[in-house]
Image (cartoon, rainbow, N blue to C red):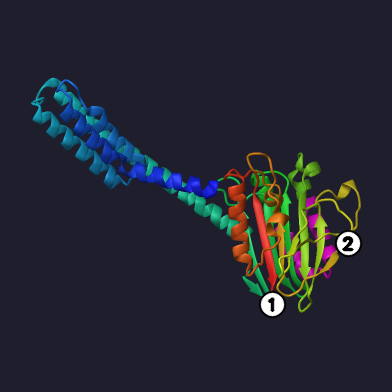
Amino acid sequence: MGSGEAQEDVSAAVRTLARFLPALLIAAGVFYDVRTPPAFTAIPFFTAAPLIAAPLSSLRTTVLTGVVSFLVAYAVHARFGLLPGVDGVTEMATVATVAVLAAGINRIVRLGDQRLASARQIAEASQRAVLPEPPERIGGLEIAARYEAAQEDAFIGGDLYAVQDTPYGVRLVVGDVRGKGMGAVAAVAVVIGAFREAAEQEATLEAVAGRLERALAREGVRRGGVDAFEGFTTAVLAELPHGDGTVRVVNRGHPPPLLLYGDGRVSPVGVPEAALPLGLGELGVWPDRAAEHAFPSGATLLLHTDGLSEARDAHGRFYDLERRLTGRVVTAPGPLLARLAAEVRRHTGGGMTDDMALLAVRRL
C-alpha cells in the first residue's frame, strides 16, 4: 500500500471516530458517574459531547446531542439526589448553556461551509471557462487533459493547456506561466485566448508561437511593474495534420513532450534548436523552427508541465517519468493521466509543490 492510500485510510478512520465521539463521551460520563462517589462529577463529558458534535454534524444532530447530554446528566444527578441542590442546579445550567452555544457554533460553521462551497463553485466555473475540457475525440485522435493543483481545493493556477481543431490540423499547447496568484491566471487567459485565435488564422506553427510572443509582450506592458521585464511563459506547441501520421513541435523552453509507442517504447520529442520562453523576445532573436516526428497509429503524445517531471519525494529524488512509462502499453489517454496523477501524489507523499497540467493525444 502506498503512502497516499495509507493517509486516506487514516483520514477515513478519524472521520468515523469523530462521528461517534459525542455518543462515546456521553457513555463515558454515565460510566464515570456510576463508578465514582457522588462528590465526583462527569459534567465535563456531558458538555464536551455537544461541542464536539457542533463542527462535525448537522444542526439537528448537534441539538439532539445537547438534549441527550442534558437529560442523561439530569438522570444521573437525580439518581444520586443531587437535585435541587445548588451544585446540581449549577451543573445542569452549565450543560444547557453549552448545548445552546454548540447549536450556535454549528450554524456559524455551516454558514462558513456554504461560503466555501460557493467559492469552490466559482473556482470550478473559472477553470471551465479558462481551461475547458477538450473533446474526447477529434477525427482519429483520442484526447484527454488533466489539471492537478498543488494547493488543496485550488482549481487553477499558472499551468495551462488548450486543444484546437483547425484547417491546418489539431493544434495543442501546454505551458507554465512564471509566478503564482491572479497575475498568473490572467497570463494563462491571455496565452489561451491568443492561441485559439492564432491557431485558426496562422498557416504555420511558428507563426502561432510568434502571435503568443506578441500577446504576452502586450500583457506585460499593460500590467507594468516587474512583470513588464521578467514575466515569461514556457510552452510547447504541437500540430497534428489531418490524415497525416506526423507531429510538428515548437518548444519555447518547456519540458519536451514524450511519444509513447504501441510496443512500450518511449521517446522524447526534441527540437533542433532551443528557444527562449514566451515573453522574453527582447533578450534575443531565435527564430522558431518546428521539428517533425513520425506519429504512428497506436502511439500516444504526452505533453506536461514540470510539476510532473520535477516532482520530488521526501529524499529529493525526482519522479523519473520516462523510466516509469517505458514498457507500458497505453490503451486510452484518460486512464494514463489518472494513473500518472496518482503516482505523483504517492511519490511526493501528497505534498506536491507545483501545479501539474497534462495533455495526452492517442492516434487510433
Q: Is residue 77 left or right of residue 237?
A: left
Q: Quadrant of residue 49?
A: top left
Looking at marks 2 and 1 on the same chain, the residue that comes earlier in the sequence is marked by 1
Determine if residue 153 is in view: no
Determine if residue 297 is in view: yes
Residue for point 19% across, 22% down: 40
Residue for point 73% across, 61% down: 173
Q: SS of the residue at dot 2? A: loop
Q: Is residue 294 above or below residue 319?
A: below
Which percent across, then down, holds residue 136?
62, 70
Residue for point 69% across, 70% down: 362
Residue range highlighted in magenta: 192-218
Which residue in the structure is indicated by mark 1? 140
Q: Is residue 306 above or below residue 49?
A: below
Which percent across, then down, holds residue 342?
58, 54
Which percent across, then down, holds residue 207?
84, 64
Chief SS of the magenta region: helix
Residue for point 81% across, 50% down: 279
Q: Quadrant of residue 363?
A: bottom right
Q: Is residue 333 magenta?
A: no
Which percent across, then down, holds residue 322?
73, 56
Q: Which mark is residue 289?
A: 2
Where's the C terminus, which quadrant?
A: bottom right
Q: Amino acid at mark 2?
A: Arg
Q: SS of the residue at dot 1? A: loop
> For the residues carrying marks 2 and 1, which lies nearer the camera in this image?
1
